[in-house]
Image (cartoon, rainbow, N blue to C red):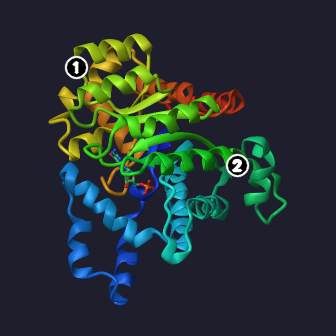
Protein backbone atom coordinates (compact mmCIF):
# COMPACT_ATOMS: atom_id res chain seq x y z
CA UNK A 1 0.00 0.00 0.00
CA UNK A 2 1.33 3.45 -0.85
CA UNK A 3 2.63 5.41 2.13
CA UNK A 4 0.08 8.24 1.61
CA UNK A 5 -2.72 5.72 1.79
CA UNK A 6 -1.37 4.04 4.95
CA UNK A 7 -0.98 7.42 6.65
CA UNK A 8 -3.89 8.00 9.08
CA UNK A 9 -5.80 11.08 7.99
CA UNK A 10 -8.49 13.51 9.10
CA UNK A 11 -10.94 14.88 6.52
CA UNK A 12 -12.76 18.06 7.52
CA UNK A 13 -14.04 19.48 4.23
CA UNK A 14 -15.92 16.91 2.14
CA UNK A 15 -19.30 17.61 0.50
CA UNK A 16 -21.44 14.48 0.34
CA UNK A 17 -22.71 14.93 -3.22
CA UNK A 18 -19.32 16.09 -4.43
CA UNK A 19 -17.70 12.93 -3.06
CA UNK A 20 -19.95 10.54 -4.99
CA UNK A 21 -18.16 7.71 -6.79
CA UNK A 22 -17.87 8.24 -10.55
CA UNK A 23 -19.17 4.74 -11.21
CA UNK A 24 -22.23 5.36 -9.04
CA UNK A 25 -22.97 8.69 -10.69
CA UNK A 26 -22.77 7.16 -14.15
CA UNK A 27 -24.88 4.16 -13.12
CA UNK A 28 -27.60 6.38 -11.63
CA UNK A 29 -27.53 8.74 -14.63
CA UNK A 30 -27.89 5.78 -16.98
CA UNK A 31 -30.89 4.49 -15.03
CA UNK A 32 -32.57 7.92 -15.19
CA UNK A 33 -31.72 8.08 -18.90
CA UNK A 34 -33.49 4.76 -19.46
CA UNK A 35 -36.56 6.14 -17.66
CA UNK A 36 -36.47 9.18 -19.95
CA UNK A 37 -35.94 11.63 -17.06
CA UNK A 38 -32.63 12.88 -18.50
CA UNK A 39 -30.76 12.58 -21.79
CA UNK A 40 -27.90 10.25 -20.81
CA UNK A 41 -25.73 10.95 -23.86
CA UNK A 42 -25.57 14.65 -22.96
CA UNK A 43 -25.14 14.04 -19.25
CA UNK A 44 -22.38 11.44 -19.72
CA UNK A 45 -20.25 14.05 -21.49
CA UNK A 46 -20.69 16.52 -18.60
CA UNK A 47 -19.85 13.91 -15.96
CA UNK A 48 -16.73 12.63 -17.73
CA UNK A 49 -15.27 16.09 -18.42
CA UNK A 50 -12.13 16.57 -16.37
CA UNK A 51 -11.28 20.26 -15.99
CA UNK A 52 -14.17 22.51 -15.10
CA UNK A 53 -14.44 26.21 -14.50
CA UNK A 54 -16.09 27.34 -11.28
CA UNK A 55 -19.33 28.02 -13.16
CA UNK A 56 -19.31 24.56 -14.71
CA UNK A 57 -18.76 22.95 -11.32
CA UNK A 58 -21.97 24.46 -10.00
CA UNK A 59 -23.85 23.42 -13.16
CA UNK A 60 -22.58 19.89 -12.53
CA UNK A 61 -23.87 20.05 -8.94
CA UNK A 62 -27.34 20.94 -10.21
CA UNK A 63 -27.17 17.86 -12.41
CA UNK A 64 -25.85 15.64 -9.60
CA UNK A 65 -28.72 16.78 -7.41
CA UNK A 66 -31.28 15.72 -10.03
CA UNK A 67 -29.60 12.33 -10.17
CA UNK A 68 -29.03 11.73 -6.45
CA UNK A 69 -31.77 13.43 -4.49
CA UNK A 70 -34.08 10.65 -3.37
CA UNK A 71 -33.92 8.93 0.00
CA UNK A 72 -32.50 5.58 -1.14
CA UNK A 73 -29.78 7.21 -3.23
CA UNK A 74 -28.77 9.60 -0.46
CA UNK A 75 -28.41 6.58 1.84
CA UNK A 76 -26.40 4.68 -0.75
CA UNK A 77 -23.95 7.47 -1.53
CA UNK A 78 -23.43 8.22 2.17
CA UNK A 79 -22.51 4.58 2.76
CA UNK A 80 -20.17 4.51 -0.23
CA UNK A 81 -18.48 7.81 0.62
CA UNK A 82 -17.69 6.60 4.14
CA UNK A 83 -16.38 3.28 2.82
CA UNK A 84 -14.16 5.13 0.36
CA UNK A 85 -12.66 7.46 2.96
CA UNK A 86 -12.17 4.60 5.42
CA UNK A 87 -10.44 2.51 2.75
CA UNK A 88 -7.70 5.14 2.47
CA UNK A 89 -7.24 5.32 6.25
CA UNK A 90 -9.27 8.40 7.02
CA UNK A 91 -9.85 7.88 10.74
CA UNK A 92 -12.06 10.93 11.30
CA UNK A 93 -14.44 12.35 8.72
CA UNK A 94 -16.54 15.49 8.97
CA UNK A 95 -19.02 15.08 6.16
CA UNK A 96 -21.09 18.08 5.11
CA UNK A 97 -24.28 18.13 3.11
CA UNK A 98 -27.13 20.50 2.29
CA UNK A 99 -30.47 19.22 3.62
CA UNK A 100 -32.84 19.36 0.64
CA UNK A 101 -36.57 19.59 0.39
CA UNK A 102 -38.41 18.07 -2.56
CA UNK A 103 -42.17 17.94 -2.02
CA UNK A 104 -42.78 15.92 -5.18
CA UNK A 105 -41.09 12.86 -3.64
CA UNK A 106 -42.07 13.56 -0.02
CA UNK A 107 -38.60 14.72 0.96
CA UNK A 108 -38.18 17.25 3.74
CA UNK A 109 -34.89 18.58 5.07
CA UNK A 110 -35.38 16.29 8.05
CA UNK A 111 -36.05 13.16 5.98
CA UNK A 112 -33.00 14.00 3.83
CA UNK A 113 -30.75 14.03 6.91
CA UNK A 114 -32.42 10.87 8.21
CA UNK A 115 -31.50 9.20 4.90
CA UNK A 116 -27.88 10.30 5.49
CA UNK A 117 -27.94 8.80 9.00
CA UNK A 118 -29.34 5.57 7.55
CA UNK A 119 -26.29 5.53 5.26
CA UNK A 120 -23.99 5.82 8.29
CA UNK A 121 -25.70 2.83 9.87
CA UNK A 122 -25.55 0.82 6.63
CA UNK A 123 -21.75 0.68 6.51
CA UNK A 124 -20.53 -2.78 7.46
CA UNK A 125 -16.96 -2.93 6.15
CA UNK A 126 -15.70 -0.68 8.95
CA UNK A 127 -16.91 0.40 12.40
CA UNK A 128 -18.59 3.79 12.16
CA UNK A 129 -18.63 5.82 15.37
CA UNK A 130 -20.93 8.76 14.89
CA UNK A 131 -23.12 9.18 17.98
CA UNK A 132 -21.30 11.29 20.59
CA UNK A 133 -23.06 9.78 23.60
CA UNK A 134 -22.88 6.24 22.35
CA UNK A 135 -19.50 6.03 20.70
CA UNK A 136 -18.58 2.61 22.00
CA UNK A 137 -21.84 0.77 21.73
CA UNK A 138 -22.49 2.03 18.19
CA UNK A 139 -19.45 0.12 17.03
CA UNK A 140 -20.87 -3.06 18.36
CA UNK A 141 -24.45 -2.50 17.25
CA UNK A 142 -23.38 -1.29 13.83
CA UNK A 143 -20.88 -3.82 12.78
CA UNK A 144 -19.94 -6.56 15.19
CA UNK A 145 -18.38 -9.36 13.14
CA UNK A 146 -20.48 -12.53 13.16
CA UNK A 147 -17.60 -14.51 14.58
CA UNK A 148 -16.64 -14.62 18.27
CA UNK A 149 -13.01 -14.17 17.36
CA UNK A 150 -11.73 -11.53 19.76
CA UNK A 151 -8.76 -10.68 17.54
CA UNK A 152 -11.10 -9.99 14.70
CA UNK A 153 -13.06 -7.47 16.80
CA UNK A 154 -9.87 -5.74 17.86
CA UNK A 155 -8.43 -5.42 14.40
CA UNK A 156 -11.49 -4.00 12.67
CA UNK A 157 -11.02 -0.56 11.28
CA UNK A 158 -12.90 2.29 12.87
CA UNK A 159 -13.81 5.68 11.49
CA UNK A 160 -15.28 8.54 13.49
CA UNK A 161 -17.87 10.48 11.50
CA UNK A 162 -19.48 13.81 12.32
CA UNK A 163 -21.95 15.74 10.20
CA UNK A 164 -22.11 19.40 9.24
CA UNK A 165 -25.33 20.69 7.72
CA UNK A 166 -24.73 23.14 4.89
CA UNK A 167 -26.66 26.29 4.17
CA UNK A 168 -26.75 26.83 0.41
CA UNK A 169 -26.16 30.45 -0.58
CA UNK A 170 -29.35 30.33 -2.68
CA UNK A 171 -31.43 29.86 0.47
CA UNK A 172 -33.52 32.43 2.34
CA UNK A 173 -32.97 33.38 5.97
CA UNK A 174 -35.95 31.18 6.93
CA UNK A 175 -34.57 28.16 5.07
CA UNK A 176 -31.14 28.71 6.66
CA UNK A 177 -32.80 28.89 10.07
CA UNK A 178 -34.66 25.63 9.36
CA UNK A 179 -31.31 23.94 8.71
CA UNK A 180 -29.89 25.27 11.98
CA UNK A 181 -32.96 24.05 13.94
CA UNK A 182 -32.56 20.63 12.36
CA UNK A 183 -28.86 20.54 13.27
CA UNK A 184 -29.77 21.31 16.89
CA UNK A 185 -32.36 18.53 16.99
CA UNK A 186 -29.91 16.05 15.48
CA UNK A 187 -26.93 16.67 17.70
CA UNK A 188 -27.33 13.30 19.39
CA UNK A 189 -26.91 11.74 15.92
CA UNK A 190 -23.55 13.33 15.34
CA UNK A 191 -24.46 16.69 13.80
CA UNK A 192 -21.87 19.10 15.16
CA UNK A 193 -22.06 22.22 13.07
CA UNK A 194 -23.08 24.39 10.17
CA UNK A 195 -21.32 25.14 6.91
CA UNK A 196 -22.06 27.97 4.49
CA UNK A 197 -21.47 26.90 0.89
CA UNK A 198 -22.95 27.02 -2.60
CA UNK A 199 -22.20 29.25 -5.55
CA UNK A 200 -20.15 32.15 -4.13
CA UNK A 201 -21.42 34.66 -6.68
CA UNK A 202 -24.97 34.15 -5.40
CA UNK A 203 -26.54 35.60 -2.25
CA UNK A 204 -25.69 38.07 0.50
CA UNK A 205 -23.90 37.58 3.82
CA UNK A 206 -26.70 39.41 5.66
CA UNK A 207 -29.19 36.74 4.54
CA UNK A 208 -27.39 33.94 6.43
CA UNK A 209 -26.08 35.96 9.34
CA UNK A 210 -29.12 35.59 11.65
CA UNK A 211 -29.08 31.79 11.27
CA UNK A 212 -25.30 31.60 11.72
CA UNK A 213 -25.43 33.79 14.82
CA UNK A 214 -28.21 31.69 16.30
CA UNK A 215 -26.31 28.48 15.52
CA UNK A 216 -23.27 29.80 17.32
CA UNK A 217 -25.28 30.97 20.33
CA UNK A 218 -26.66 27.45 20.60
CA UNK A 219 -23.15 25.95 20.61
CA UNK A 220 -22.93 24.62 17.07
CA UNK A 221 -19.57 24.97 15.33
CA UNK A 222 -19.39 27.13 12.21
CA UNK A 223 -17.25 26.85 9.10
CA UNK A 224 -17.64 29.21 6.14
CA UNK A 225 -16.60 29.00 2.49
CA UNK A 226 -14.67 32.24 2.43
CA UNK A 227 -12.90 34.14 -0.33
CA UNK A 228 -13.56 31.78 -3.24
CA UNK A 229 -14.16 34.84 -5.42
CA UNK A 230 -12.96 38.42 -4.93
CA UNK A 231 -15.55 39.96 -2.58
CA UNK A 232 -13.70 42.16 -0.16
CA UNK A 233 -16.64 43.24 1.99
CA UNK A 234 -17.95 39.71 2.45
CA UNK A 235 -14.49 38.38 3.29
CA UNK A 236 -14.11 41.06 5.97
CA UNK A 237 -17.57 40.29 7.38
CA UNK A 238 -16.79 36.60 7.49
CA UNK A 239 -13.46 37.09 9.25
CA UNK A 240 -15.09 39.51 11.73
CA UNK A 241 -17.62 36.78 12.52
CA UNK A 242 -14.72 34.63 13.79
CA UNK A 243 -15.90 31.23 12.56
CA UNK A 244 -14.14 28.18 14.04
CA UNK A 245 -12.76 27.36 10.58
CA UNK A 246 -12.95 28.67 7.03
CA UNK A 247 -12.72 26.84 3.72
CA UNK A 248 -10.53 27.87 0.76
CA UNK A 249 -9.47 31.46 1.70
CA UNK A 250 -8.21 32.39 -1.75
CA UNK A 251 -8.96 36.03 -2.56
CA UNK A 252 -7.86 37.66 0.70
CA UNK A 253 -5.97 40.95 0.61
CA UNK A 254 -3.03 41.92 2.81
CA UNK A 255 -5.26 43.18 5.62
CA UNK A 256 -7.41 40.01 5.53
CA UNK A 257 -4.34 37.77 5.72
CA UNK A 258 -3.13 39.73 8.73
CA UNK A 259 -6.50 39.36 10.43
CA UNK A 260 -6.78 35.65 9.60
CA UNK A 261 -3.32 35.04 11.01
CA UNK A 262 -3.70 37.13 14.13
CA UNK A 263 -7.06 35.47 14.91
CA UNK A 264 -5.54 32.05 14.07
CA UNK A 265 -8.64 30.92 12.19
CA UNK A 266 -7.88 27.42 10.85
CA UNK A 267 -8.10 27.06 7.07
CA UNK A 268 -9.42 24.01 5.22
CA UNK A 269 -7.08 23.76 2.20
CA UNK A 270 -8.44 22.11 -0.95
CA UNK A 271 -5.51 22.04 -3.39
CA UNK A 272 -6.90 20.02 -6.30
CA UNK A 273 -10.26 21.78 -6.15
CA UNK A 274 -8.60 25.22 -6.29
CA UNK A 275 -6.33 24.21 -9.16
CA UNK A 276 -9.01 22.43 -11.19
CA UNK A 277 -11.39 25.38 -10.96
CA UNK A 278 -8.48 27.66 -11.85
CA UNK A 279 -9.10 29.72 -8.70
CA UNK A 280 -5.35 29.39 -8.07
CA UNK A 281 -3.14 29.22 -11.20
CA UNK A 282 -0.50 26.79 -9.89
CA UNK A 283 0.54 24.97 -6.76
CA UNK A 284 3.70 27.05 -6.20
CA UNK A 285 1.61 30.23 -5.78
CA UNK A 286 -1.04 28.52 -3.62
CA UNK A 287 -1.51 30.22 -0.23
CA UNK A 288 -1.00 26.81 1.39
CA UNK A 289 2.74 27.37 0.98
CA UNK A 290 2.73 30.66 2.88
CA UNK A 291 0.33 29.43 5.57
CA UNK A 292 2.34 26.25 6.12
CA UNK A 293 5.61 28.18 6.40
CA UNK A 294 3.93 30.64 8.80
CA UNK A 295 2.75 27.66 10.92
CA UNK A 296 -0.83 28.88 10.53
CA UNK A 297 -3.45 26.29 11.57
CA UNK A 298 -4.54 24.42 8.46
CA UNK A 299 -5.88 21.08 7.33
CA UNK A 300 -5.63 19.42 3.92
CA UNK A 301 -9.02 18.37 2.51
CA UNK A 302 -10.58 17.00 -0.68
CA UNK A 303 -13.67 19.27 -1.05
CA UNK A 304 -15.30 17.08 -3.73
CA UNK A 305 -13.26 13.91 -4.28
CA UNK A 306 -15.72 12.60 -6.90
CA UNK A 307 -16.12 15.80 -8.89
CA UNK A 308 -12.38 16.57 -8.86
CA UNK A 309 -11.20 12.94 -9.09
CA UNK A 310 -8.97 13.12 -6.06
CA UNK A 311 -8.53 11.49 -2.66
CA UNK A 312 -7.16 12.73 0.65
CA UNK A 313 -4.05 10.56 0.15
CA UNK A 314 -3.51 12.32 -3.16
CA UNK A 315 -3.87 15.77 -1.53
CA UNK A 316 -1.12 14.86 0.97
CA UNK A 317 1.08 13.61 -1.83
CA UNK A 318 0.63 16.84 -3.82
CA UNK A 319 1.33 19.00 -0.76
CA UNK A 320 4.42 17.03 0.21
CA UNK A 321 5.82 16.99 -3.29
CA UNK A 322 5.31 20.70 -3.88
CA UNK A 323 6.85 21.73 -0.56
CA UNK A 324 9.47 19.01 -0.50
CA UNK A 325 8.19 17.69 2.85
CA UNK A 326 9.61 14.52 4.37
CA UNK A 327 7.47 11.73 5.85
CA UNK A 328 7.92 13.05 9.37
CA UNK A 329 6.59 16.50 8.44
CA UNK A 330 3.68 15.02 6.51
CA UNK A 331 2.80 12.81 9.45
CA UNK A 332 2.84 15.84 11.77
CA UNK A 333 0.70 17.83 9.31
CA UNK A 334 -1.87 15.05 9.28
CA UNK A 335 -1.78 14.51 13.05
CA UNK A 336 -2.11 18.22 13.71
CA UNK A 337 -5.52 18.22 11.93
CA UNK A 338 -6.92 16.58 15.08
CA UNK A 339 -6.73 19.97 16.82
CA UNK A 340 -9.32 21.46 14.42
CA UNK A 341 -12.02 18.77 14.48
CA UNK A 342 -15.46 19.73 15.79
CA UNK A 343 -15.70 16.66 18.03
CA UNK A 344 -15.17 16.53 21.78
CA UNK A 345 -11.91 16.03 23.65
CA UNK A 346 -12.53 12.29 24.13
CA UNK A 347 -12.54 11.76 20.36
CA UNK A 348 -9.43 13.92 19.97
CA UNK A 349 -7.64 11.81 22.57
CA UNK A 350 -8.64 8.58 20.76
CA UNK A 351 -7.35 10.01 17.50
CA UNK A 352 -4.02 11.02 19.02
CA UNK A 353 -3.58 7.46 20.33
CA UNK A 354 -4.47 6.15 16.90
CA UNK A 355 -1.81 8.30 15.25
CA UNK A 356 0.80 7.42 17.87
CA UNK A 357 0.32 3.71 17.35
CA UNK A 358 0.38 4.16 13.55
CA UNK A 359 3.64 6.13 13.81
CA UNK A 360 5.47 2.99 14.91
CA UNK A 361 4.61 1.09 11.74
CA UNK A 362 4.88 3.93 9.25
CA UNK A 363 8.61 4.34 8.64
P1 LIG B 1 -24.27 18.48 -1.01
O1 LIG B 1 -24.42 19.60 -0.05
O2 LIG B 1 -25.39 18.45 -2.03
O3 LIG B 1 -24.07 17.14 -0.37
O4 LIG B 1 -22.90 18.71 -1.82
C1 LIG B 1 -22.81 19.48 -3.00
C2 LIG B 1 -22.99 20.94 -2.70
O5 LIG B 1 -21.89 21.43 -1.90
C3 LIG B 1 -22.95 21.85 -3.94
O6 LIG B 1 -24.22 21.93 -4.53
C4 LIG B 1 -22.52 23.18 -3.34
O7 LIG B 1 -23.59 23.84 -2.74
C5 LIG B 1 -21.56 22.75 -2.25
N1 LIG B 1 -20.16 22.77 -2.74
C6 LIG B 1 -19.43 21.74 -3.17
N2 LIG B 1 -18.20 22.13 -3.52
C7 LIG B 1 -18.15 23.45 -3.30
C8 LIG B 1 -17.12 24.44 -3.45
O8 LIG B 1 -15.99 24.19 -3.87
N3 LIG B 1 -17.47 25.71 -3.11
C9 LIG B 1 -18.69 26.03 -2.63
N4 LIG B 1 -18.93 27.30 -2.31
N5 LIG B 1 -19.67 25.13 -2.47
C10 LIG B 1 -19.40 23.85 -2.80
Note whether residue 305 is visible.
yes
Q: Helix, strand, or loop for circle 2?
A: helix
- Disc 2 residue crowd, few under 14, some 14–19, many 20+, Cα 10 Å: few
Q: Which residue is drawn at 50% across and 26% down?
A: 244
Q: What residue does disc 1 label?
A: 253
Picture quadrant where residue 79 is located: bottom right
Q: What residue does disc 2 label?
A: 155
Q: Which residue lies furthest to the bottom in this view?
A: 35
Where does the image place residue 53, in percent across and percent down from the top left? 18, 51
Where does the image place residue 187, in percent across and percent down from the top left? 68, 44
Front-most of residues 289 and 42: 42
Note whether residue 361 is visible.
no
Where does the image place residue 350, in percent across and percent down from the top left? 69, 32
Q: Residue at x 69, y 49 (%)?
A: 189
- Disc 1 residue crowd, few under 14, some 14–19, many 20+, Cα 10 Å: some
N-terminal-most mark, 1 or 2:
2
* Label 1 CB less than 8 angstroms from ligand 1: no
Amino acid sequence: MEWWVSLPKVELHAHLNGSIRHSTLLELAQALGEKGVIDFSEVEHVILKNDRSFREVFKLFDLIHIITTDHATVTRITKEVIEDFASENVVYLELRTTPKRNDSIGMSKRSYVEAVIKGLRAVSSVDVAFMPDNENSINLVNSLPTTNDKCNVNTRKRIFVRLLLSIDRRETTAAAMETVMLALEMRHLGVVGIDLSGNPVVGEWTTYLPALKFAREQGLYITLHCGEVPNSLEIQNMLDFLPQRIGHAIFLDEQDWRKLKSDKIPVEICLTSNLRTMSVPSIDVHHFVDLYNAKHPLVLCTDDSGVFSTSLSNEYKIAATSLGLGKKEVFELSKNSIEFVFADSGVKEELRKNFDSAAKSLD
